[in-house]
Amino acid sequence: MRIATWNVNSAKQRMPRLLPWLDERRPDVVCLQETKLADAAFAALLGQELAARGYEAAAHGEPQWNGVAILSRVGLDDVVAGLDGGPGFPHP
């Protein structure tokens, strides 16, 4: 299994590099940090492209700062955004 992590510092800005990188490296699981996209915006921007490559995605973020996403070609079950009582964003 190939697992990768990448601090993209804006998924929107890295999209031209992210998609070819996924095609070339074909990791099974990818953890992205600093996506800087709200959940719906992440899905709108990358959802179809990721699905076409066989990835399921779970994202949790704000439009201007922070944000994380997990991309998986082996599936995602029982996704829970945020941790009860932990630091993080004000909404799941």
Image: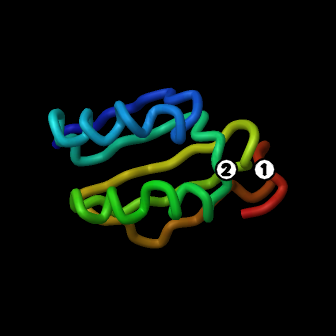
Judge depth for marks 2 and 1 and give the one in front. Answer: 2
Q: Position of residue 4 (x, y in %)?
A: 32, 33
Q: Secondary structure at mark 2?
A: loop
Q: Secondary structure at mark 1?
A: loop
At label 1, which amino acid type do we have? Phe
Q: CA distance from mark 2 to mark 1?
A: 8 Å
Q: Is residue 88 left or right of residue 47?
A: right
At label 2, which amino acid type do we have? Gly
In the image, residue 50 sits, relative to residue 62, either above or below, namely: below
What's the residue at 36%, 65% (across, down)?
A: 48
For the rendered model, the colour scheme is: rainbow
Q: Position of residue 1 (x, y in %)?
A: 16, 43
Q: Earlier in the sequence, mark 2 or mark 1?
A: 2
Q: Is residue 70 left or right of residue 36?
A: left
Q: Which residue is mark 1?
A: 89
Q: Position of residue 6 (x, y in %)?
A: 43, 29
